[in-house]
Image: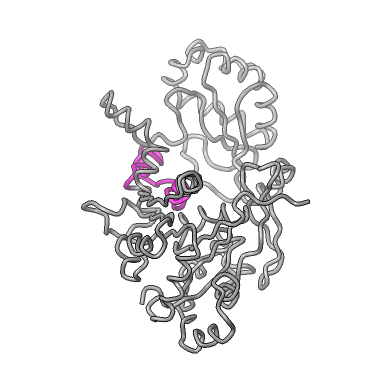
């Protein structure tokens, strides 16, 4: 007999957009929760984002949207329509959790802020996720993950030391904050089961990233007055430490490389003098490796430019996979800088069942990410991503108990033509 999933019976209203909240609550949906995603039917923003399946634009074809919204129900709802707002209040009454991820003040304009929802459902768990929190001098700034990357300090430390900041790839702050939102949401559910009380959670992405990913840099400045800055691929306590071009690359060794799609790279990290000795054995103990100036970490750091050049000369005679295997067999940390193609074919990911194949109603069979963790007794049961507005009638009938006549009346009133922001 199939076990009950861990979040089965938990009802969620998803008012989020883009990444943080939709991806966080997807964790609950994939493990059994009923998650209703309220969307706009006119120009839905995330559904317009690349890449599109087969390069064909369509609101149901966005890989960006689809990755973050498996196992959910899609409801297009006009919250400025009085009857649409009545449906939204019924959903709040139905829900255990309501979450939103807009600029502070936005959902209050729809009449769906925490104080209003608490009057409708006193034990509601309500989560607001924004760039810098719901209050303070900067709270009302419209912020996206790329901007939060900069506000939280990451852009300052990612890049080459003689160049302008480049920042981490993509809206890193959003994906980082997602894990904090998921954790606090589950904690609130546990608290509610123990006490019967709801919770209001105000998540500030900039603080989440600062606390969880930048804290050592911040503390180094507060305690030691030392300001970290860009250092490329280097590490203050390791050498060699970097991504080294392997067989097939074509840049001059004296130049900082510019990445090309055909280039292959392998990351190598040597922290201790013992690891250095193992590294030297792997590369065949050439004469330069026996130079006393490389014998200690201090020396390797002092002559790091020369060391990187010499290591790069060795790696260019081998494929990235060969470098990784040789290093790992010799007890040295190393890994191929994998492309998307590499990841899709990775034997370890396939063994773990990381890629989940789901049959989408418009784009057909497509692969999605599983989680990096597994629940042995109640594994995730991923369901296909919904089409835009696919569950309009289902939500009203099966979750809210409305009759066919009531649903027809609501549809005639235009509640499914949703323009959330006017």
- Residue 176 counted in the magenta span: yes
Residue at x-position 51% and y-position 85%? 411
Q: Is residue 260 visible?
A: yes
Residue at x-position 45% and y-position 28%? 235
Residue ranking furthest to the top: 292
Residue 372 in the figure: left or right of residue 21 = right
Q: In this view, does 259 lie above or below 228?
A: below
- Residue 147 counted in the magenta span: no
Q: Quadrant location of residue 219?
A: top left
Q: Quadrant location of residue 290?
A: top right
x%, y% of residue 87? 46, 75
x%, y% of residue 215? 37, 34
x%, y% of residue 191? 47, 44
Q: Which of 296 and 63 is in front in this view?
A: 63
Magenta segment range?
A: 151-177
x%, y% of residue 163? 36, 42
């Amino acid at each position: 007999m199939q076990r009950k999933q861990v979040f089965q019976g938990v009802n969620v209203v998803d008012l989020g957009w883009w990444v943080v909240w939709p991806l966080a609550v997807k964790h609950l949906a994939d493990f059994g929760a009923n998650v209703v995603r309220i969307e706009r039917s006119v120009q839905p923003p995330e559904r317009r984002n690349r890449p599109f399946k087969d390069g064909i634009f369509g609101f149901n074809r966005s890989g960006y949207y689809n990755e973050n919204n498996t196992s959910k129900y899609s409801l297009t709802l006009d919250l400025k329509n009085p009857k649409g707002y009545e449906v939204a209040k019924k959903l709040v009454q139905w829900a255990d959790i309501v979450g939103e991820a807009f600029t502070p003040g936005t959902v209050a304009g729809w009449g769906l802020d925490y104080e209003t929802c608490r009057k409708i459902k006193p034990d509601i768990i309500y989560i607001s996720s924004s760039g810098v929190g719901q209050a303070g001098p900067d709270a009302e700034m419209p912020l996206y993950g790329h901007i939060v990357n900069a506000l939280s300090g990451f852009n300052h430390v990612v890049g080459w030391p003689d160049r302008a900041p480049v920042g981490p790839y993509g809206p890193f702050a959003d994906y980082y904050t997602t894990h904090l939102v998921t954790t606090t949401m589950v904690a609130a559910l546990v608290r509610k089961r123990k006490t019967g009380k709801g919770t209001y959670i105000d998540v500030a992405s900039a603080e989440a990233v600062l606390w969880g990913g930048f804290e050592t840099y911040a503390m180094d400045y507060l305690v030691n007055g030392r300001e970290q800055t860009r250092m490329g691929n280097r590490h203050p306590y390791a050498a060699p430490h970097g991504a080294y071009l392997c067989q097939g690359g074509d840049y001059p060794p004296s130049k900082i490389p510019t990445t090309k799609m055909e280039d292959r790279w392998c990351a190598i990290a040597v922290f201790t003098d013992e690891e250095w000795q193992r590294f030297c054995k792997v590369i065949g103990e050439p004469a330069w490796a026996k130079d006393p100036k490389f014998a200690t970490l201090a020396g390797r750091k002092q002559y790091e430019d020369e060391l990187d050049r010499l290591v790069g000369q060795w790696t260019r005679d081998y494929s990235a996979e060969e470098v990784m295997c040789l290093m790992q067999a010799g007890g040295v940390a190393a890994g191929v800088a994998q492309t998307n193609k590499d990841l899709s074919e990775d034997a370890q990911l396939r063994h773990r069942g990381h890629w989940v194949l789901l049959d989408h109603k418009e784009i057909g069979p497509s692969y999605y990410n599983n989680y990096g963790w597994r629940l042995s007794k109640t594994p995730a049961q991923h369901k296909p991503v919904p089409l835009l507005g696919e569950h309009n009638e289902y939500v009203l009938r099966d979750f809210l108990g409305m009759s066919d006549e009531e649903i027809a009346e609501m549809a005639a009133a235009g509640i499914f033509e949703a323009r959330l922001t006017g």
